[in-house]
Image (cartoon, grey):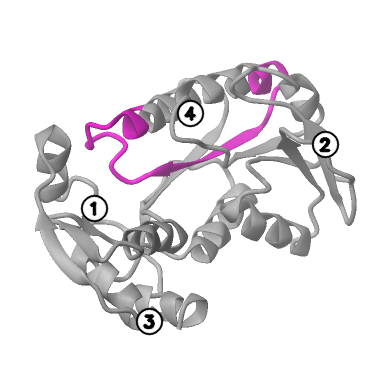
């Protein structure tokens, strides 16, 4: 009988796609969650908190593979270091991490935290795999939906994104998790690059709304980085198939 695969962030958007795929592959899953949940259908839950360094030892015990999906607006580097320490003591054989494209180029705290987490994984001494992905369609939808509530929608000039479908990211992560440790693998991005205005207009069309659009400029180093496309991955990248328009048709239209 194989050991369970520990999944952090298993109850989130990405985890909601990953866990069924792991179960379909015949693997038992253990999820580290901040809230107690009943076990069932090959999935068990261990209560803990990565950032507070609580419950991690129990979560990694007996797990040869750890898939680290958990993340937040800040503190991912510290949380990952806590996980790495416990995984090292448990002699985990494969640590898989999902990061974000631009972790090493976009001068924002969120990206710096992701880069710190990447380094913690790479320097752990454990066999590891890290995949950087573009922003999920789900996240972009949340942003444009909030902006679309205003009668005037701001359009940050020069901001471009290549959103990817979270289900395609999940499928790739499961493939990597069940394979051999591969280090840093090619980025995974969506099939098209969109300006922020295009993303908003697509959402407004799909939802049958009409709004005024107002160009705005993003100041500072972050704005400069986005205008330079530092958040994009265009060379040597793996490309998903599902477009923003197809996602909107399913979720909004």
Q: Which residues are magenta?
A: 86-112
Q: Along the polypeptide, which appears first: circle 3 or circle 4?
A: 4
Determine the image quadrant of residue 236.
bottom left
Q: Along the polypeptide, which appears first: circle 3 or circle 2?
A: 2
Measure how far apart labels 3 and 4 are at the Cα level. 34 Å
Label 3 crowd (10 A; few <14 / some 14-19 / many >=20): some
Foreground of the two, 71 or 183 = 71
Measure how far apart labels 1 and 2 are at the Cα level. 38 Å
Foreground of the two, 181 or 114 = 114
Measure how far apart labels 4 and 1 are at the Cα level. 21 Å
Q: Secondary structure at mark 1?
A: loop
In x, y percent, where is residue 57?
75, 20
Locate the C terminus by quadrant. Answer: bottom left
> Would residue 111 be counted in the magenta stretch?
yes
Measure how far apart labels 1 and 3 are at the Cα level. 25 Å
Query: Is residue 195 among what the camera can see?
Result: no
Q: Is residue 55 above or below residue 188?
A: above
In x, y percent, where is residue 8?
65, 38
On the image, numbered disc 2 is attached to which residue? 36
Q: Secondary structure at mark 3?
A: helix
Measure how far apart labels 3 and 2 are at the Cα level. 38 Å
Foreground of the two, 244 or 115 = 244
| Image-based side of 162 in relation to 51, left or right | left
Label 2 crowd (10 A; few <14 / some 14-19 / many >=20): few
On the image, numbered disc 1 is attached to which residue? 232
Q: Along the polypeptide, which appears first: circle 4 or circle 1?
A: 4
Q: Which mark is residue 76?
A: 4
Determine the image quadrant of residue 20.
bottom right
Disc nearest the viewer among 1 and 2: 2
Q: Which residue does the image show at 9% across and 48% down from the upper left?
A: 217
On the image, numbered disc 3 is attached to which residue? 206
């Amino acid at each position: 009988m194989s050991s369970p695969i520990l999944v952090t962030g298993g109850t989130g958007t990405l985890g909601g796609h990953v866990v069924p795929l792991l179960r379909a592959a015949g693997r038992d899953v253990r999820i580290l969650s901040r809230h107690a949940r009943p076990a069932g259908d090959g999935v068990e839950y261990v209560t803990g908190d990565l950032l507070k360094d609580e419950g991690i030892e129990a979560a990694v015990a007996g797990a040869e593979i750890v898939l680290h999906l958990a993340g937040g607006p800040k503190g991912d580097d510290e949380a990952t270091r806590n996980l790495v320490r416990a995984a090292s003591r448990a002699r985990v054989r494969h640590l898989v991490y999902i990061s974000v494209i631009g972790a090493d180029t976009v001068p924002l705290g969120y990206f710096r935290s992701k880069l710190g987490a990447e380094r913690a994984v790479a320097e752990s001494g454990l066999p590891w795999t890290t995949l950087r992905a573009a922003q999920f369609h789900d996240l972009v939808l949340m942003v444009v939906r909030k902006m679309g509530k205003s009668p005037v929608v701001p359009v940050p000039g020069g901001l471009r994104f290549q959103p990817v479908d979270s289900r395609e990211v999940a499928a790739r992560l499961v493939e990597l998790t069940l394979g051999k440790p591969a280090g840093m693998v090619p980025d995974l991005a969506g099939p098209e690059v969109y300006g922020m205005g295009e993303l908003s207009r697509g959402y407004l069309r799909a939802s049958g709304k009409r709004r005024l659009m107002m160009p705005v400029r993003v100041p500072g180093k972050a704005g400069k980085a986005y205008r330079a496309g530092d958040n994009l991955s265009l060379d040597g990248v793996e490309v998903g198939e599902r477009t923003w328009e197809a996602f909107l048709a399913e979720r909004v239209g």
